[in-house]
Each structure stands twice: as structure tokens, then as C-alpha cells.
Image (tube, rainbow, N blue to C red):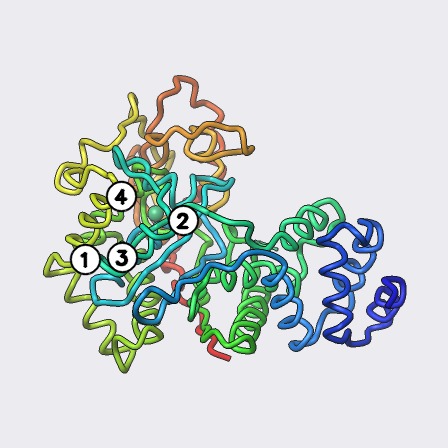
């Protein structure tokens, strides 16, 4: 078999066989096939697309290129949730203890990563003492005992994806549905999930800005998951404005605590109930979405979800008293309000603009080497559709730095106030199950 023929075949729009996909992935991972030939194939895939069968084969082969996490010692069906990323997305912090509180096991492998705020692990590390450096045995024991645990990335997962992603980054081939879908799904499958709920975001703060692109990506991922024997569904949700009110690490932990007490922002609460109900049904802890939702709502109001969060934090070294006393979380030295220049209704809060502003305050990493300020971030006081008076606070900056002029400018450019009537945006656009 020759790489040249595989490139030519895809260039001409033909379907690659399993053997051809194995040959290219394994050859590239081992270093036998050079970057320039793989670059050419990636560009051919970018223009010619892949069939559903090719996408599933590509994903399976990437999974098999490295280690796979074995969660078989955990009782029950392990359902993982994956979000395609956005601004101030506090859902994982809420969903992990909430879903666990109705008996569905949550075995979460998470990372730090780059972005507007830290990853789930950074956020959780705002809780003094909390850590995710635990052994695989401890991780499995904790999920069996408490139904929830979060572990840092371990093992050599999907090395093929790591190499391909770096190459795509420098060859203008990141933005390809079959390549994105196989990249995301290979990582989820290698981390051991039996079933997967995807939260595909759309809007200004999302990877897929356009609703049709978000749907196409969701369909591609659901098809891959189901073809490789993992029950998979996707929710398409709004990321035109940030989710909830908090953007920042310790601010989002506080927001999660509020939400777990049933006092959280409406949009964050609703999205967690929608995603959580799907997870509970896939875990076979309820027969219908309606039953699952009722169970989750009950545990938000009776304190059980919050109790699970405390147990989860304490069992990984965290000071669980922060839940009852949020003053113990890292706090910025300054709180600076940004005021509205005019009265009216909020028309737009551009999610990536506000997200970048939070990152400039230190809430996220611009490069792998950047340090995160766990206390830094933004608390919104208004969302799209809300009325505002002239001089009223739109949001509060939480900062340990003095010069916030460029941050304030970016925020003012990201928030539009109008005299017209504005409706709050749709939160859930679609559900994709096949
Ligand atoms: N996130 C991923 O993990 N892979 C992609 O290709 C794009 C986004
Ligand atoms: Ca939030």
C-alpha cells in the first residue's frame, strides 16, 4: 500500500477502505509517513469530506493508536458529557454532583487547557486543598463509593489525534467536520465512556458560530458514537452570550454552588437539567426524560445535590466548608463595576469578547505557560433582553491588577444596548439522537 495512492483516491472524492485508513493513521503515528503527505491528505479530506463509515473507522483507529482507560470496575453505565467549549460554561461543575446524586456514576477525566477561563480542574482547584492527582484505583473506588470523581489526564491517550491536531493547526485544516468529529470522539471513547451526551454550542462564543455547522458537527459525532457502540446524543445550545453570570474560576465555583441549591441563573440551571436528564436516562437510572428531570429537580431543592458536591470535594482533599462559606474561595483585591452609558435593553453580549476580557484579567491561559489567577473574572448583572438604566452596573470585574482600561474598552465594544425590544435568545436549539 502506498500513501500516494490514498491521497490520490481521496483527492478524487472516493471512499477510503478500513485498511487504507489504518495504514495512514498507524504509519503517521509511528513516524513512517511524512507530514507533507499527511498534509495533502488532510486537505483532500477538507474538500472531499468523508462518509459516515470512513469517519467511524478513522475515530476507531485513532482510539487504538494509544492507551484506553478501563472503567469496567465501576458499577453501572458510565455516561460522559462533553461540551464543545464556550464562555463561562459552568455546566460540568454542576452536572457532576447533580447526576451522581441520583445514582448515575460520573467518572470524569478532565484537563486544564487554554481559553477564556481555566478547565474544570483549574476551576475546582479554587477550593483550597482540592486535587485531581489520584491513582486510577483511587478514582475507581471513589466513583463506586460516592458516584463521582474527577481525575487529571493520565496515560497516552490518542497520540494520533495529538499529531494530527498539531498538523491541522498549521495547514488550515482544523475547520473540517469529519476531522473535528473524529478528534473529539476519539478522546471521549478512549477515556472509557459507555455513553456520551454532547453539548454542541453555537453562536459568537462557540467553535461553530453558525447553527447549521453546529448541527452538522453534532450529527457527525452522534453517528460516530453510535457506530462504535457508544450510545450518543447531542444537545445544540446557545453560546451567543456567556452561559450563566460568572466567568472565572472561583466565581464559577460559587455559581455552581448557587445552582446546586436551586438558586442559580436560569439559563445555566435549565441547560444542566436538559443535559442531566439525558445522562440519567442513558445511565438507565430513569425510564423517561420527564422522570429524570423530576429526580434532578428534587435533588436541587432537597439539598442532596449540594451534599454530593461536599462529599466529592472532601474526598479529594478539598475544604468542603467553602460550600457554606463562599468567602473562603479565592477573592480578588478589587471589584470594579462597568456602567451602562445609556438606558435601554441589552441587545448583544458578544460571548468571545467578554471571554477575552476575562482572560485579560487573568482568568484563563493565553499560552500553556501562562499562570491563572483563580480569583479573577467577570460577574454579569445583565443578560440579553434585560432592561438597563443609564449608569447602572452591567457587570463587575474581579481583578488583582490596576490597569483595566483595555479590558473595559473591550467590554464596552462587546455589549450593545438598544432602544428596541429584545427577546432573550433561544437556549436549546435542537436535540440530535441519530
Ligand atoms: N476540539 C478538538 O478536540 N478537536 C478538534 O479538532 C477541534 C476542537
Ligand atoms: Ca457561568
From the top left corner, tell me how far across and down residue 188 is, in percent: 49, 61
Distance from Cα at disc 2 to Cα at disc 1:
24 Å
Mark 1 Cα within 10 Å, few/some/many (few <14, many 20+)?
A: many
Q: Looking at the image, is mark 1 or mark 4 nearer the viewer? A: 4
Between label 1 and label 3, give the one nearer the viewer.
1
Q: Gap between marks 4 and 3, in whole Å? A: 30 Å
Q: Quote the CA–CA distance across marks 3 and 2.
A: 13 Å
Counting residues from the start of the chain, the first of labels 4 and 3 encountered is: 3
Residue 271 vertical placement versus 407 (above, below): below
Q: Nearer the viewer, residue 139 or 56?
A: 139
- Residue denoted by label 3: 266
Q: Is residue 287 left or right of residue 24?
A: left
Disc 2 + disc 1, Cβ < 8 Å:
no
At horizontal 26% and vertical 43% (from top left) the residue drawn is: 316
Secondary structure, mark 4, is loop
Where is ligand 1, by quadrant? bottom right
Residue depicted at x 52% and y 72%: 225
* Label 2 within 8 A of ligand 2 by Cβ: yes
**Residue at position x 25%, y 78% from top?**
286
First-in-chain label (2 vs 1): 2
Res. 338 visible in picture: no
Distance from label 4 to label 2 (Cα)?
29 Å
- Identify the residue under disc 2: 242
Residue, disc 1 = 305
Earlier in the chain: of badge 3 and badge 2, it is: 2
Q: Nearer the viewer, residue 265 or 432?
A: 432
Q: In the structure shown, which secondary structural element does the residue marked by tag 1 occupy?
A: helix
Q: Does residue 170 appear to the left or right of 304 in the view shown?
A: right
To which quarter of the image does residue 277 belong?
bottom left
Q: How many marks?
A: 4
Quadrant (top left/top right/bottom left/bottom right) for the N terminus: bottom right
Amino acid at each position: 500500500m502506498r500513501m500516494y495512492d490514498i491521497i490520490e483516491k481521496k483527492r478524487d472524492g472516493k471512499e477510503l477502505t478500513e485498511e487504507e485508513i489504518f495504514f495512514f493513521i498507524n504509519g503517521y503515528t509511528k513516524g513512517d509517513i511524512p507530514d507533507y503527505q499527511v498534509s495533502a491528505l488532510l486537505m483532500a479530506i477538507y474538500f472531499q469530506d468523508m462518509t459516515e463509515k470512513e469517519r467511524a473507522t478513522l475515530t476507531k483507529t485513532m482510539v487504538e493508536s494509544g492507551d484506553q482507560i478501563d472503567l469496567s470496575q465501576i458499577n453501572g453505565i458510565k455516561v460522559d458529557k462533553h461540551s464543545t467549549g464556550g464562555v463561562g460554561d459552568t455546566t460540568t461543575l454542576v452536572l457532576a454532583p447533580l447526576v451522581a446524586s441520583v445514582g448515575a456514576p460520573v467518572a470524569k477525566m478532565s484537563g486544564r487547557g487554554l481559553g477564556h477561563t481555566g478547565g474544570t480542574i483549574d476551576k475546582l482547584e479554587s477550593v483550597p486543598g482540592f486535587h485531581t492527582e489520584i491513582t486510577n484505583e483511587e478514582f475507581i473506588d471513589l466513583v463506586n463509593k460516592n458516584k463521582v470523581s474527577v481525575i487529571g489526564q493520565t496515560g497516552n491517550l490518542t497520540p494520533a489525534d495529538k499529531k494530527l491536531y498539531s498538523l491541522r493547526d498549521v495547514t488550515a485544516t482544523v475547520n473540517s467536520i469529519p476531522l473535528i468529529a473524529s478528534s473529539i470522539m476519539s478522546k471521549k471513547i478512549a477515556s472509557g465512556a459507555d455513553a456520551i451526551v454532547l453539548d454542541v454550542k453555537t453562536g459568537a462564543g462557540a467553535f461553530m458560530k453558525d447553527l447549521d455547522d453546529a448541527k452538522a458537527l453534532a450529527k457527525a459525532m452522534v453517528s460516530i458514537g453510535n457506530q462504535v457502540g457508544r450510545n450518543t446524543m447531542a444537545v445544540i445550545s446557545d453560546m451567543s452570550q456567556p452561559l450563566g453570570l460568572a466567568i472565572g474560576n472561583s466565581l464559577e465555583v460559587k455559581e455552581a454552588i448557587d445552582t446546586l441549591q436551586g438558586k442559580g441563573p436560569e439559563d445555566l440551571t435549565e441547560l444542566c437539567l436538559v443535559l442531566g436528564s439525558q445522562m440519567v436516562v442513558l445511565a438507565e437510572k430513569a425510564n423517561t426524560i420527564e422522570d429524570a428531570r423530576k429526580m434532578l429537580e428534587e435533588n436541587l431543592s432537597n439539598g442532596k445535590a449540594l451534599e454530593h458536591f461536599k462529599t466529592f470535594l472532601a474526598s479529594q482533599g478539598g475544604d468542603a466548608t467553602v460550600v457554606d462559606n463562599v468567602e473562603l474561595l479565592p477573592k480578588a483585591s478589587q471589584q470594579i463595576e462597568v456602567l451602562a452609558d445609556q438606558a435601554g435593553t441589552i441587545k448583544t453580549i458578544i460571548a468571545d469578547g467578554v471571554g477575552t476580557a476575562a482572560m485579560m484579567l487573568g482568568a484563563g491561559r493565553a499560552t500553556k505557560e501562562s499562570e491563572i489567577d483563580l480569583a479573577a473574572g467577570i460577574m454579569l448583572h445583565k443578560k440579553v433582553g434585560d432592561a438597563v438604566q443609564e449608569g447602572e452596573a452591567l457587570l463587575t470585574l474581579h481583578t488583582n491588577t490596576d490597569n483595566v482600561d483595555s479590558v473595559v474598552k473591550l467590554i464596552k465594544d462587546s455589549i450593545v444596548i438598544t432602544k428596541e425590544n429584545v427577546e432573550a435568545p433561544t437556549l436549546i436549539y435542537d436535540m440530535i439522537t441519530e
